[in-house]
Image: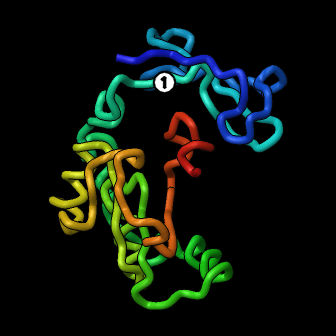
Amino acid sequence: MYKFEWSTECEMCKDPVADHVVMGLRLNRSQGFKPKRQKGVAVTVCKCNKCGLIYPNPMPVPASINDHYGVDPDQYWPEHYFKIEDDYMASEMAALEKLMPFKHGMKALDLGAGVGKSMIALKKYGFDVFGIEPSTTFHKHAISRMGIAEDRIFCKSIQEADFQSNYFDFISLYNVVEHVYDPFATIQ
């Protein structure tokens, strides 16, 4: 069950939407080769001229996160997705190391941890890693298939997270901002 919320300003930079570029439409299912023949709920996909955020307008907001992401990860991704390449996140880690020198044992939090791939990569780089994943199916998969320890990944939303201030040296939102309803508030 979804409700649809119209935006009047960019959810990231607060630029008014009146002049944003309309990129097209997106259905709530596979669009296939001839999307005009498909039935479903369509939303307009827009791009902010100021910050480049791509977003749907209206924004479909599920009644529960699991209404949207409560899918079986084995059905959501192909088998090769679960293999973590040696260079997974290498360019991101190289960019991060330019901003802050790594020290073994620095604490990292991966928000929207999914099945735990980024948590595994961050651990490989020496971080003491924790994760938050609100989807119950993704959370269970991170533990059962990817080997993430239950005391390291929490099944809750960022709003429900309860960590002491300044506990983490690094917080990752790898492949997350495009999935949240209010990116500006999430980052704050």
Taking 99 as reference, is 93 left or right? Answer: left
Taking 121 as reference, is 54 left or right? Answer: right
Query: Relative to the observer, which residue lies in front, 2 or 187?
Result: 187
Please say whether residue 77 is visible from this viewpoint. Answer: no
Q: Quadrant of residue 79?
A: bottom left
Q: Is residue 38 above or below residue 164?
A: above
Q: Residue at x 45, y 72 (%)?
A: 168
Q: Is residue 160 above or below residue 55?
A: below
The residue furthest bottom is: 104
Residue 142 x %, y %: 25, 58
Q: Quadrant of residue 55?
A: top right
Q: Is residue 77 above or below residue 63?
A: below
Amino acid type, label 1 = Gly
Q: The N terminus lies in which quarter of the figure?
A: top left
Residue 173 x %, y %: 50, 57
Q: Residue at x 72, y 27 (%)?
A: 9
Taking 49 as reference, is 138 left or right? Answer: left
Residue 108 x %, y %: 43, 72
Please say whether residue 52 is visible from this viewpoint. Answer: yes
Q: Secondary structure at mark 1?
A: loop
The residue furthest front is: 165
Residue 64 x %, y %: 32, 28
Query: Relative to the observer, which residue lies in front, 172 or 40?
Result: 172
Taking 9 as reference, is 157 left or right? Answer: left
Q: Residue at x 77, y 44 (%)?
A: 51
Give the total number of marks visible in the rendering: 1
Q: Residue at x 19, y 60 (%)?
A: 143
Q: Residues within 10 Å of mark 1 (few under 14, many from 20)?
A: few
Residue behind mark 1: 32
Asked which colour scheme the image uses, the reply is rainbow
